[in-house]
Amino acid sequence: MSPTTPKLADPGALIRAGKILREAEFPVCTDQDLLTEYEELTARLDAAKDAPRDSLASGGDVAGLTEQRDAVEERIAAKTVVLRLRALGRLRWKALKDEHAARKDGEGNMVPADMFLRVNTDTFFEVAVRESLIAPVLDDETRDLLLDEQINDAQWNDLGTLVWNLNEARVSVPFSSAASPSRKTSARK
């Protein structure tokens, strides 16, 4: 071993102590009226910024609208629950996909809604999202209230996409600068 080659850590210790499965956050505002107010203020602020300088909608209104929108942002932050989701282990993810295999129609053809992901899209995400949710810790009733009644279909689809990507997206680990061939080449010059 040359003096410049770093000693590698014990792989077993790294694996046992590691945080290998990917995680992501998904914010959910529990007051949709605040989001509507924020969108309206943003539209008014954009209009005020774009208005000609001599227009009634220009100038002084920008500062006031900015202050109002900032105040609404603070209220939104106070009413937001951040969900933390974690990828499932490889074997559990595979089992989940097998348990919720794509449906077939009467002629044995895959149902169009299931063709792209090759899972039963009506049942798969109901389980995958719930199993991936690691924080906050919620009792079943509160979790179901949030996921089934308090988020809309677009948010549900975004949650499903997030869980799918946590488990299916490729993960590439960058090499250290000491091991990188491009760094070694540039260091010799």
Image (spheres, rainbow, N blue to C red):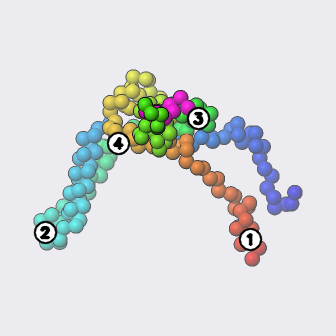
Q: Secondary structure at mark 2?
A: loop
Ranked by sequence position, the earlier of labels 4 and 1 is: 4
Region rendered in magenta: 98-105
Ranked by sequence position, the earlier of labels 1 and 3 is: 3
Position of residue 136 relative to residue 53, above or below, is: above
Q: Given the image, on which type of amino acid does mark 3 rest? A: Lys
Asked if residue 136 shows in the view, the reply is no
C-alpha span from label 2 to label 1: 61 Å
Mark 1 vs mark 3: give the one in front: 3
Quadrant of the image occupied by residue 81: top left
Q: Which residue in the structure is indicated by mark 1?
A: 185
Q: Which residue in the structure is indicated by mark 4?
A: 154
Main SS, magenta region, reads loop
- Closer-to-camera residue (110/94): 110
Please identify the residue farthest to the bottom as the structure is shown. 189
For label 3, count other residues whose C-alpha is less than 10 Å away and answer few (under 14), some (14-19) or many (20+): few
Q: Given the image, on which type of amino acid does mark 1 rest? A: Thr
Position of residue 24 relative to residue 51, above or below, is: above
Q: Which residue in the structure is indicated by mark 3?
A: 94
**Residue drawn where x is 29% and y is 52% of the image:** 70
Q: Position of residue 45 (x, y in %)?
A: 23, 59
C-alpha span from label 1 to label 3: 42 Å
> What is the number of the mark on residue 55?
2
**Residue drawn where x is 73% and y is 61% of the image:** 178
Q: Given the image, on which type of amino acid does mark 2 rest? A: Ser
